Structure formats: structure tokens, C-alpha cells
Image (tube, helix red, strand yellow):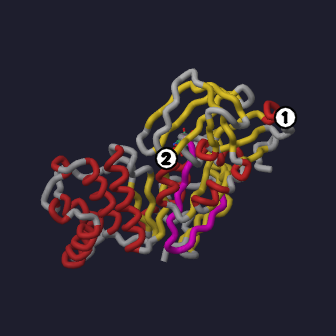
Amino acid sequence: MGSLNIENVKKSFGQVDVLKGIDLDVADGEFVVFVGPSGCGKSTLLRVIAGLEDATSGRVVIDGRDVSSTPPAKRGIAMVFQTYALYPHLTVKNNMGLGLKQAGTPAAEIDKRVAEASAMLSLEPYLQRRPAELSGGQRQRVAIGRAVVREPSLFLFDEPLSNLDAALRVNTRLEIAQLHRRLRATMIYVTHDQVEAMTLADRIVVLNGGRIEQIGAPMELYNSPANEFVAGFIGSPRMNFIEGARLGESVRTVGVRPEHIAVDPHNGDWKSTVIHAEHLGADTNLYLDCEKAGLITVRLFGVYNAEPGATLYATPDPAHTYRFGQDGRRI
Ligand SMILES: Nc1ncnc2c1ncn2[C@@H]1O[C@H](COP(=O)(O)OP(=O)(O)O)[C@@H](O)[C@H]1O
Ligand SMILES: [Mg+2]
């Protein structure tokens, strides 16, 4: 069990309104990712769910029970932070079991849970080591294991991969996805990384300035962004935005993703000059200065040789072109 309902939650620090009325229902077993730019209120919302911050108003309901004034330890949650916060003098095994020990769980039960969690997280060879004898990725797996052994109804993760290097981030991301599948537990995961959001989430909540911009499955957000903010935030490289007036349109902005623009040396809609080509191996990013549309990014599959200064014609795919009104909403 691990459903969560957030009802009109607001949070202010003094005069500063950080959460401006958040409503969200998370079903038991769902993996929900909060994503948004730095400072938009992701951690604050997670901390309100955990009970580490009190909401200024509104309710937090876990498994049908209003926990708004329940202390964190009694909410049935476990939280994993960016920094691992392991005890340096304790072994991996004792770090994982400490919370249970303090809660008075019998030793045999602790051993059983630690054994299960360490098997799940491939930590068995390291149980007798201390944190200093582990890599960053292993330490974060211990921190996750420490959460797993508590068998919470709700896991809360706050940017758990941000301190890891790129390769470890991918590995640990995969482990978290597998862990979710095995445990069928509800997970709320905060990140500013839209790739993490896209790859892990059943549903993504896009936050901006203390409000929810849109909630949806990853591909819903990619294919049907509700507004210019979501369109620009989801997808990499970022969607191109072109002032409507430049294209003779009455809308504020026309949006087209880099992967939805074709190029040809001789024919096409937008005559342009190559500014730069980035060769990523599997694909090529071209930066073009279009006479009509200004600077755009084009993403091409595979290797595409284009010299700076050369002329190319870019053609956006009309089936994947978005239009946004004066208020930023998609038309
Ligand atoms: N304890 C606090 N006192 C005052 N302001 C805070 C406090 N905690 C967070 N804030 C402010 O609230 C805003 C949102 O912070 P946070 O939730 O940490 O953002 P995020 O996790 O999305 O980067 C920021 O402007 C931050 O400075
Ligand atoms: Mg944060």
C-alpha cells in the first residue's frame, strides 16, 4: 500500500511563496517523477510529503490517512538524498540495518531484510566494508538499501544520482527502475534531469515556479506538451522556438524539435548557413542560421558532414510543429 494525495498544498518561507497550490494523486505502486528547473520547489514538495517541512496550508494523505501533522518517522516513508549520509564507522551491513535496530526490530528479522536488500542491489560482496572503502555508486546503493529494508509504503528520492559520474548514473538509474519493478512500491523521485524523468517515470510532474505545469506519461509530455515551458523542458536538444511573426503567423511562437527538421543541400523551406556541427557518433547536431527562422538546432541520425559556412535548406515536419499563443499555452 502506498497511495498519496496532495491537496492544495502551499508552502511559504516568510514572504516567499515556494509552493503555490499543488494538487496531485499518486496511485499505489506508481513511479512519479518531479522535474523542473533548480529552485522551482521540487525538494520542498518532497520534504512536505516526508514531513520534514510543514505545509503552510493544504493536506498530505498517505494510504487514505491525513498525515499533515504526523511526524516523519510515523508516515511509513523512506527517503534517499543526493548525499548518502552513511555512518563512516559502521559497516555496510550495519548502516543498512541501523534504522531497524533503533526501531527495536529483532536481529534475525534485520539480518533477513538486509540479506534480501543487499542481494537486490548487488551489495553482498561489500557487507563488511565501511563507506570509505566503496565507490560513490556503491555508497548510493547502500543508502537505497537502507531505505529498502524499512519496507516503506512510499519511497522518496531527492536527486539521488546527481553526485555520480555519467556512467554510474545510467547504471544506478537502471537499478532503481528494476527495484521499482521488483518491490512494486510507490516511488516519488525528484530530479532536474529530464532524461532521468523520461526513463524512470510512469508519470512526470513538471514543476515551475511552485506550480504544476503539466502531469502526464513521458511520451504524452513529449508529444503533447500543454505549453511552451513543458515543450522546452522535455526533449534534448531543446525544442526550437521561432517567433510567429518571422514565419508570417499570428501566433507568438512556432515550436519544432531538432529531430523533426530535415536538411537538404539544394531544396527546402528555410535557406540557412551552417554555424557548427557536433558529431556525437550515433547522431549529428547541426546549428543553422536560417534567413527566415533565425538560429535553430537540427538533430540528424548518424553522421552528417556539414562544413561551417555551407548552405543547407531546413524543412520542419508539419506533423510535428507546435504553436503557442500569447499566454504560452499550446494552440
Ligand atoms: N528553509 C528555507 N528557507 C527559505 N527559503 C527556502 C528554504 N528552503 C527552500 N527555500 C527556497 O524555496 C525555493 C525552492 O527550493 P527547493 O524546493 O529546494 O527547489 P528545488 O529542489 O526545485 O531546486 C528556492 O527559492 C529556495 O531558495
Ligand atoms: Mg532540490
Q: Which residues are magenta?
A: 21-37
Which residue is rendered at x = 27% and y = 58% of the image? 142
Judge the density around disc 2: few (<14), some (14-19), many (≥20) Cα neighbours within 10 Å: some
Instruction: Give the number of the disc on residue 193.
Output: 2
Which residue is rendered at x = 34% and y = 56% of the image? 172
| Amino acid on which disc 2 is placed | Asp
- Of circles 2 and 1, which is in front? 1
- Residue 75: tell me if it is visible: no
Q: Depth check: 141 or 65 in front?
A: 141
View extreme (front): residue: 266
| Amino acid on which disc 1 is placed | Gly
152 versus 316 height, above or below: below
Q: Depth check: 291 or 18 in front?
A: 291
Quadrant housing residue 324? top right
210 versus 247 height, above or below: below
Instruction: Give the number of the disc on residue 95.
Output: none
Upstream in sequence: badge 2 or badge 1: 2
Left or right: residue 134 versus residue 194 is left
Q: Give percent across and percent down for residue 287.
A: 57, 30
Determine if the magenta segment contains residue 39.
no
Marks 2 and 1, Cα distance to the nearest angstrom? Answer: 35 Å
Which residue is rendered at x = 73% and y = 36% of the image? 269
Residue that label 1 marks: 248
SS label for mark 2 = loop
Determine if the magenta segment contains residue 31.
yes
314 versus 21 height, above or below: above
